[in-house]
Every structure is written in C-alpha cells, then in structure tokens.
Image: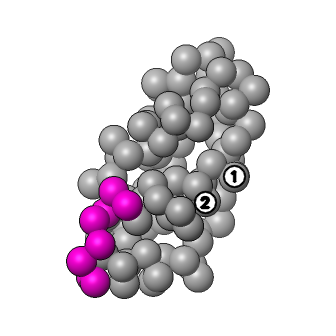
Amino acid sequence: MTVRLHLPDEPVALKPIWYGRVLGGEPLTEILGGEGGFVPWLWLRWRAVEADGLDAKSFEGLVMEYQRELWLWLGGERTWAQCSSGLAGRIARRFPG
C-alpha cells in the first residue's frame, strides 16, 4: 500500500510562534512534540493514516526523526513545500500499512 498525504497549507500564523520559542531557549523537541506544537498540528491534518495502522505515537516518532529539516524550515532555510513534501515522503516510505 502506498500512502498519499496531501500537503497542508503552511502554518504561517504558528511558524513565528514556534520559531520564537526556539530563540527563547525552549528545546526543539518540546516545540515540535509538545502541546500546541508542530506534531499535534500535523496529526490533525494527516490523522487519516491512523485508520491504516499508524498510531499517534509512531507518527510522532517519524516526525521527530525529521526535526533537522523542520528546524531548517522554521529558520527560513527550507521552504514549506520542500519540508512538507519531504516529510510526507518519509512517512509514506516508513508507513506500516
């Protein structure tokens, strides 16, 4: 089975908040995976994968393995299209379904 994930619109309102938290010294792992972070935001958009066997914890692990690229997106070194398409591909390649 091949997973096909749509690319959600860039979270333009949240990106500067997350980036500001990093600059304020908060660990990137907390910003990505914690309450109000990137992983919960993305899970709401890609949760359809749950029906085929990818649970929230495994999803979080796959996203957290991509944190370097997410950091580069937050810092403006990667575009949203580059980051989100790369992450979608990563999940599709490692998807258990």
- The number of numbered discs placed on residues in the rendered structure image is 2
Mark 2 vs mark 1, foreground winner is: 2
Q: Where is residue 94 in the image (x, y as percent from the top left)?
A: 46, 24
Please give the name of the residue rendered at 28% of the width and 84% of the height, measured from the top-left corner: 24
Q: Is residue 96 inside the magenta stretch?
A: no
For this orientation, the residue located farthest to the front is 35
- Give me the disc on residue 79: none
- Give me the disc on residue 45: 1
Tell whether label 1 touches label 2 (CB within 8 Å).
Answer: yes
| Residue ID for mark 2 | 41
Q: Which quadrant holds residue 79?
A: bottom left
Q: Confirm whether residue 76 shows in the render.
A: no
Please give the name of the residue rendered at 48% of the width and 76% of the height, measured from the top-left corner: 15
Q: Is mark 2 on a helix, strand or loop?
A: helix
Front residue of 81 and 43? 43
Please give the name of the residue rendered at 53% of the width and 24% of the height, measured from the top-left corner: 95
Side of 68 relative to 17 (left or right): left
Magenta part of the chain: 23-30
Q: In this view, does 26 lie above or below 4?
A: below
Q: Position of residue 43 (x, y in %)?
A: 63, 48
Dot 1 amino acid type: Arg
Front residue of 35 and 49? 35
Label 2: how many Cα within 10 Å (few below 14, some 14–19, many 20+): some
Side of 86 relative to 75 (left or right): right
The C terminus sits in image quarter:
top right
Q: Is residue 27 inside the magenta stretch?
A: yes
Q: Confirm whether residue 86 shows in the render.
A: yes
Q: Is residue 75 above or below residue 95?
A: below
Q: What element carries label 1?
A: helix
* Mark pair 2, 1: CA separation: 7 Å
